[in-house]
Every structure is written in structure tokens, then in C-alpha cells.
Amino acid sequence: MLQYQIDRIEYNISENRAQTGVFLIGPLDRGQAITLGNALRRVLIGGLEGSAITAVRIAGVSHEYATIPGVREDVLDIMLNCKQVSINSRNSELEIGRLAITGPAHITAADFQFSSQVQVIDGKSPIATIAQDYSIEMEVHVERGVGYRPVDRHSDDTSAIDLLKIDAVFMPVRRVNYTIDETAVGEGGAARERLRLEIQTNGSMTPEDAMAEAANQLIALFQPIANLTMVEEPNPEPEPSTEAQIPLEELNLSVRAYNCLKRAQVNSVSDLMGFSYEDLLEIKNFGSKSADEVIEALERIGISLPQSRPT
């Protein structure tokens, strides 16, 4: 089995608390670096679970195109600012944060009051600017999810008219880049490769944790294939044809042939199809004349019996 190592060669935390890590993975055989890089990138970008603000409620506001007296930003700008807040909820259920502030003030994400299950990553994220002697009351909803969830604009849900929903970006990984470098030639003259992977998160998880979680998702994806055991299903019995379901009485046989077949537990054409000409002759009191009569009756409906039993 190919052995390789993973080294973190760079790590930094930016002013907005985003974390960036650069990893070197190798040596790998030719073609394995791009396979690993593509798979990890797809899961890192769209497969990891994260948290986001999904809705906003502002006192006295009923639609996103309104303005608030004494507030520099309009409601749409406030919603966009909330959308960009990096946040981490450890609760799978809905969490609600609230604030009530009187100006003058520059409102940031740190002003929201949450339960202990929610952590605001970058408390300096701007929300709104309020003038003196004006006040604002807000409520934000935080949920966990995967990928990107747009607001359903055609929803008929009018249970909360003043709840302004936001397109939610749950993705904790903001950017993934990778490059492939050729390393020294391995044994037997085979070229080796090394994968350089750069991961930037929003700060709700470290690049190392993001890469480990993506790798575990890929392992879980391939595990059923690795343990695959095929069980051959028995072939279903073919349904008898319409002719085979004809009762014995409809063949219009002689009384002697009919009685002999009945005593041999032959009640329909399907029962006769298991006989050969030789088998008919072995029925008690069933001679060649009766056997010929049965053969002719079956041929009239398109069924023929073999002359001898199969060996």
C-alpha cells in the first residue's frame, strides 16, 4: 500500500477570523493527486455542515424594501450584512438572537445576545449605524445546514409577515485551491506527485478539521462499495401461457383417455406439458391409441410433446 505524509506548511488567521491552511500531501503515484484533490475539493466546498443566519425580524418593519427612521442602512442592506456574519451553532435546532439598542451606535454582530450554544466568529461584522435618540430592536434566526439554501419566493407561508428570510450560506469553507507538483522519480522509474491543498474557512472550523471531515465523508461514500457482496436472485418462474391453463375437459378427449389421465392426477394442459410420449404410454390402461389422441389434441392448440423423456 502506498504510504504518504501530510504536512501543514502555512497557517494564518485574518482580521475577520477566517482561517487559512496550506497542506502538502505526498508522495503519490501519477494521477492520484488530481483524484484526491478533486474529491476533497467537491466535499469541502459543498458537503460540510455549517451555520448561518436565515431570517431577520425588525420591529416596525414588514418588508425588505423599507427604511428605518434614524438608521443609515435600509432594511435590505441590514439583511445583506446579517448574511455575511460568520457564526457557529452547536445546536441542530433553531437558535434566536436578539438586540435592542438606542443610538448613537455602530451595531455589530457582537451586539446580538445568543444562548451558550451559539458563537459569533467575527464580532466586528457591521450590522447597522443608528443615530442619536433613535432605537432599533432586532431578532435573527440561526440554523445549521449544508451548502446554499435560497429563499422560496413563491411560498404561500404567511404565518409571520414581519419575518424576513435570507438566502442562507451554510458552507464553512470559503475557498479551496490545489496544485500538483512532480517530485523525484520513485522505484522502477515511476514519476511521483505531490498535492498542494489550500483551504480557507470562515473561522467556524479549522482547515485541518474541514479536511478530516471531508475525508471521512468520502470514506463513508466508498465503504459500501468496498464491502459489496452480490447475492444472485433466483430467476422467477415463468407464468404459464394461456394455452397451458386450459382444463383437461376442453380437449374433448375420449372417455377412456380422459378417465386415465384424471386417475394420474392430470387436470389441465399445464400438467400434460410435463409428459413425453413415452410417459403417456406408462400411464395405467393408457395405450398408444390414447396417447396419439392426446398428442393430436395438444397440437390443435399449438403444443407439442417430446417423443421421449429427456436423459
Image (cartoon, helix red, strand yellow):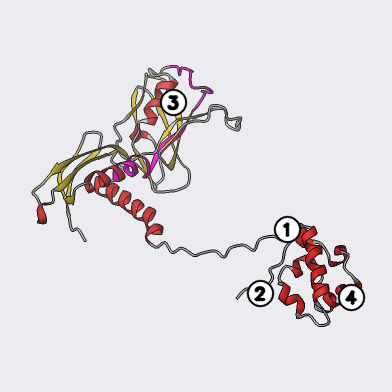
Q: In which quarter of the image is the N terminus?
A: bottom left
Task: List x then y, in percent, for residue 138.
Answer: 45, 30
Q: Which mark is residue 136?
A: 3
The magenta span reads: 40-69
Tag 4, which secondary structure?
helix
How far apart are the alpha carbons under marks 2 and 1?
22 Å
How far apart are the alpha carbons under marks 2 and 3?
96 Å
Task: List x then y, in percent, for residue 56.
Answer: 46, 31
Determine the residue located farthest toward the front in the rendered image.
289
How far apart are the alpha carbons under marks 1 and 3?
80 Å
Which one is in front in this view, the residue at disc 1 or the one at disc 3? 1
Which one is in front in this view, the residue at disc 2 or the one at disc 3? 2
Which residue is painted at 45% across and 29% down in the image? Answer: 137
Q: Which mark is residue 256?
A: 4
Which residue is painted at 47% across and 33% down in the image? Answer: 55
Which one is in front in this view, the residue at disc 1 or the one at disc 4? 4
Q: Residue 309 carries which label?
A: 2
